[in-house]
Amino acid sequence: MQGSLSEFRLAEILQLVAVQQKTGLLRLTQGNKLVTFYFDQGLMVATRDRRHAAYDPLLEFLARVGWLHQDTAAFLKTRLESSREDLGDILLGERYLTEDDLHAILADLAQELVHNTFTWREGTYQFISGDEAIEGLRFRIKQKIDSILMEGARRADEWPRLLERLPGPDVVIDLASAPAADFGPRPQALLAGIQGAMRLGDLVRTGRVPEYEVYEIVVQAVDAGIVRILEMPAPVRPAHSEDAPVFTPRQTATVSMWSLPRPVAWVVAIGVSVVSLGATAFLLPRVTDPHHAAAAEQLAMESARESIRREIEIYRALHGRYPATLTALTVDDLASSELLRRAGPLHYAVAQTGRSFELSDAAGATPAH
């Protein structure tokens, strides 16, 4: 399974992996960026590509959030390039980390990589299935895909809002009061690192939690009167690193139009995707001759129509109403013109009540909804 992320995006791929309980590896590429996810029976178990040992996202993450000093990270990178050692073995064997620390960090890394690639609209994907694809994996995690997707959707929605409150690493903050005990151990540990006036970027580099969480915790602490802002730069979007998420104008517009309570919208959007992909997974094995042109064309058309049904429901989850026309899906970047073409001629109409829609073959086939 392979193709373009402009047609089949990360959320849809992960949903398919979960529904079909697939085992294998998923590789995403965008320019010089490469991200790899490993799955075992529908669970995400690793994000470190052992076939590209010279680049280990774990090492970069540890240095970027303050678990390792930059000099230490550079030394370990040189060591890994000249040996066949596993970074995890070095970190545990030389007591840079405990086993509990390493497991928690690997879970943080997996969620951050999903967050960073959640909005990719360009690039390619390739899924290699089979037990052989995950043989030899060390230091596995067990992450449920639905939980990862829910959190990924939440972060994609909230990140622009956090940047409105804290526009970049040059915001200067200090600690106004000690956090209450009910603020949670992770936020308390992060806020304990605020020593006098400091830049937000410095807290990101020393906080030992992903950048998103630093921004989220600081905003919560500001609202609670625990942290105060001493200096606020002009609200210019900060420059992103190669691995940082890049948000498009479409996402900002989506946030402003979100009309359902966010947890409800996330559940509806992702739930509808899982159901429709489940239907596709049910139909796929029933094409007895995958080389038969007519059968393949019919399957492609039905799959495209299932995708359109799903995107219509996602549009409603985001906007609180069904789109007036299918073209609105392309304006919101939920569907491409190519997807609409592959679906064939369609009749689409919203019921007068606004609570349902009809999607049927324009030639008069049975309504699709």
Image (cartoon, rainbow, N blue to C red):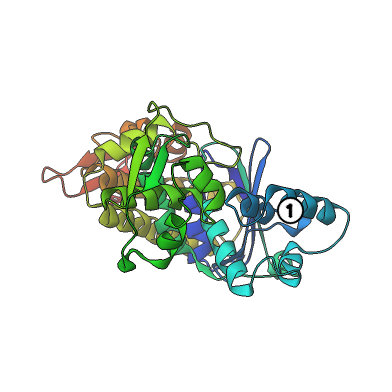
| Residue 253 visible in the picture | yes
- Please tell me how crowded label 1 is: few (under 14), some (14-19), or many (20+) other residues with Cα within 10 Å: few
Q: Is 261 situated left or right of 217 in this image? A: left
Most extreme residue toward the right is: 82
Q: Say whether residue 47 is left or right of residue 177.
A: right
Numbered label tally = 1
The residue sitting at the front extreme is 196
- The residue sitting at 44% across, 30% down in the picture is 237
**Residue 302 in view:** no
Residue 333, by quadrant, is top left
Q: SS for tag 1?
A: helix
Tell me which corner region of the image, top left, top right, bottom left or bottom right, holds residue 87: bottom right
Query: Which percent across, then down, holds residue 345?
Result: 37, 36
Residue 196 in the image: x percent, y percent? Answer: 44, 46
For this orientation, the residue located farthest to the left is 353
Disc 1 residue type (three-letter): Thr
Q: Nearer the viewer, residue 141 or 324?
A: 141
Asked whether 79 or 137 is in front, the reply is: 79
Residue 231 position in % (x across, y down): 38, 33
Q: Which residue is mark 1?
A: 72
Residue drawn at the location 66% of the way across and 52% of the way down: 57
Please say if 61 is above or below 339. Answer: below
Q: Is residue 292 above or below residue 286?
A: above
Q: Is residue 13 left or right of residue 316?
A: right
Viewer-closest of 178 and 349: 178
At 48% from the left edge and 34% from the top edge, which residue is drawn? Answer: 338
Vertical placement of residue 1 versus 328, above or below: below
Nearest the camera: 70 or 301?
A: 70
Where in the figure is residue 153, as x and y percent of width and height?
40, 51
